[in-house]
Amino acid sequence: MPAAIEVRDLHKRYGEVQAVAGIDLVVKAGEVFALLGPNGAGKSTTVEILEGHRPRSSGDVTVLGYDPETGGRRFRERIGIVLQEQAIENQLTVTEALRVYGSMYPHPRRPAELIELVGLGEKATSRIRTLSGGQRRRLELALGLVGDPDLLFLDEPTTGFDPSARRQAWTIVESLRSLGKTILLTTHYMDEAQNLADRVAVIAHGEIVAEGAPDTLGGRADASSLISFRVPSGPIHLPAGIEVSPGPDGVIQVRTPDPTRVLHRLTSWALDRGISLDGLTVTRPSLEDVYLELTGGEE
Amino acid sequence: MRARPTLGRLVWQQIRYQNTIFWRTPASAFFTLVFPLLFLFVFTLVFGNDDIPELGVTTAQFYAPSLAVFGAVSATYTNLAITTAISRDEGILKRIRGTPLPPWVYIAGRIGSATYLAAVAATIMLGVGVAFYGVRIFAVSFPSVVVTFLVGVGCFAALGMLVAAIAPNGDSTPAIANATLLPLAFISDVFIPPNANAPSWLSVIADIFPLKHFVVAFQDAFNPGVVAAKPSWLDHFQWDHLGVMALWGVAAMVLAIRYFKWEPRSGERTGRRRRRRREPVSESA
């Protein structure tokens, strides 16, 4: 299958500001790809170039076989765009808006079907003016899907959602994935990227600083784990060969690439002496830790 | 499976949907359709409906065509400028730009809808004039009325899009549109009949702008004296007035296309860019 999105050496400058400084990106057809990055890192600019909203300064961009700058009507018939905070004509009803926007595409999806998909059934004939913030976002998602696109751009799809609305949005994205749609989403929620994306790229300062599956991003798979626990006060001699460091609040921490072996030694040592290891936890660096490290902790 | 929608169908659909939005916005419907009628009502109440001595036509025979033009101009110039700029601020224009709808179809839909509303406004005005104020319509000058209407409405639709194109944001557009239209209306024979005592430079200024040409061409077509003097319907076309409006319309259209923006100017990125460009100016000031 050919790639849905191919980007080589993309640059975008605004006056003296280099917003995008040499990005390479390949998104395969049928993939859910997440762009992570702090505000101002260049992720919105990149996505807007891919959508055809913005010309690039240099580089090669192919989206669904088209150059977004020149693809025009045929290109836009095959993509769907869900931007954040974008108004829809307030005077129309939900069904009317879906019908009007659908009429611009050769193969529109039926309004009733989309309303069902995003769960706006009880609002189908209400004016858009009367929708709550969450309902409006769901309508925006429906509008992104109205042309039955091959590629869907989702710009921070769940920002401002409550937890249950987020779950619902994720379920919709999952169902789109199963239909074989390619999805490019931007987000700054780590759990969203973790849950939805097949692959993730982290953008900082206009460049991609890491790329991979959420589980392996930034060497997560190989990174050392952190074992922490408490022991009763008093002099304690831990088994030899385990390097400990004091954590906050008297917590003892052990950093190791081999948690299985270390844990075994620790627990048998503790059982032998009748000591309890209070609050024993093993953690791997979260996607968030990796992300903060990669982007220099800015947000 | 349906085929790609035809352009004609898309334009028609856009006109219909812009009309729906208009009728569901009571404030703009009121200002465009009812407001000019209030003027007719008040003017005939204050001045009575006898002949205006200098003109030889009744108050209503003078004001109905003038206010029909005023309504048509409100429906195109003021209305298009304000609603287009607001739609841009809200991001609706950007949303449209992300769909396969050709941009010109969207603009054509807006202008088509505004033209229709201008026709409704003018028809209501003339209809009320005929029904309640004894206004007379002449068959021989009616072709000229229609052509003048279309050229005038095209001209003011282009000017309205130009205001939308250059206005910094939707909040400032009503002020820009009204501050340009209302003073011009006062010197363009809309509210005040031509007066021999007025300084001549005032009418020279008015002649430069298109509104007076629209108004005068309309008034002449409804003036029994003028109509009686021109037996052929062809004689009623006033090419000088039409020419001035066409010139303004084409110039406005060229500039509107040149400067039109689909994205809000208050957007984060554009805002930052603008500030940066302004810096040297503020430092030297």
Image (tube, coloured by chain):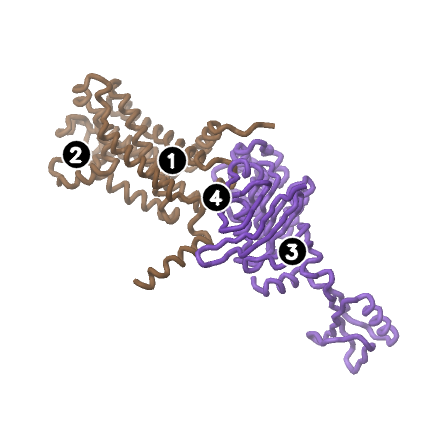
Chain colours: A purple, B brown
- The residue furthest top is B231
Can residue B101 be seen by looking at this rendering? yes
Q: Is residue B257 left or right of residue A58?
A: left
Indicate the position of residue A251 as horizontal and vertical percent values: 73, 74
Q: Distance of mark 2 from mark 1, alpha carbons?
A: 30 Å
- The residue furthest bottom is A235
Indicate the position of residue A263 as horizontal and vertical percent values: 81, 68
Contact check, label 4 and label 2, Cβ < 8 Å = no
Q: Amino acid at mark 2?
A: Pro
Task: Give the crowd class for mark 3: few <14, some 14-19, many >=20 residues within 10 Å.
Answer: some
Q: Chain of mark 2?
A: B
Q: Amino acid at mark 1?
A: Ala
Task: Give the crowd class for mark 1: few <14, some 14-19, many >=20 residues within 10 Å.
Answer: some
- The residue furthest right is A272
Circle 2 residue: B194
Circle 1 residue: B29
Q: Chain of mark 3?
A: A
Q: The N terminus of chain B appears in which quarter of the rendering? A: top right
Q: The C terminus of chain B appears in which quarter of the rendering? A: bottom left
Secondary structure at badge 2 equals: loop
Contact check, label 3 and label 1, Cβ < 8 Å = no
First in sequence, mark 2 or 1: give its number.
1
Secondary structure at badge 4 equals: helix
Circle 4 residue: B94
Circle 3 residue: A211
